[in-house]
Image (tube, rainbow, N blue to C red):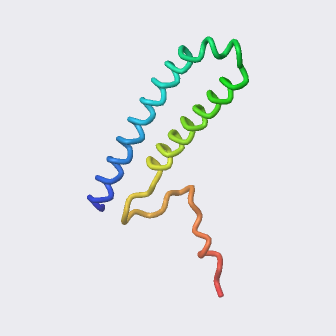
Amino acid sequence: YDMDNCADNKLIMDGLLSAQLSMSSFRTRFQTWMFGQSIEQPYQVQVWDNRLEAIQRLLRYGERTLKNRPLAGRETATNEVNITESLDP
């Protein structure tokens, strides 16, 4: 298997995990910071919280995608379909 690809994947995964931890910590602090604002403008605070949730979902998606990525030299994952197989001339 490709050692460079493995090292790249580890760096990417480390970055994703670091971003997830930072985002989780930020969201916890965000609730505290926005307490007063949530009384005056609850909709605005909810919008920002929804945006933070969307970022967290994207980070989780990136993590899942990286974990499910086939390694170089290995057959494609079973959940992937090779569409060229059925396209005989």
Q: Residue at x 50, y 46 (%)?
A: 62
Quadrant location of residue 49? top right
Which is nearer the eye, 63 or 67?
63
Q: Residue at x 37, y 42 (%)?
A: 15
Query: Which residue is most to the bottom?
Result: 89
Taking the view exactly as shown, the residue that stands out farthest to the left is 3
- 88 vs 73, left or right, is right
- Residue found 37% across the figure and 48% down from its top: 12
Q: Quadrant of the N terminus?
A: bottom left
- Indicate the position of residue 18 as horizontal and vertical percent values: 38, 35
- The answer to which of 13 and 50 lies nearer the viewer is 50
Q: Position of residue 56 (x, y in %)?
A: 54, 35
Residue displayed at 45% across by 33% down = 20
Residue 57: quadrant of the picture: top right
Q: Whole-percent x and y of residue 75?
A: 44, 64
Vertical relation: 44 (above or below) 18: above
Q: Position of residue 37 (x, y in %)?
A: 64, 16
> Horizontal placement of 8 versus 42: left or right?
left
Who is closer to the viewer here, 87 or 37? 37
* Location of residue 59 with respect to 26 vertically, above or below: below
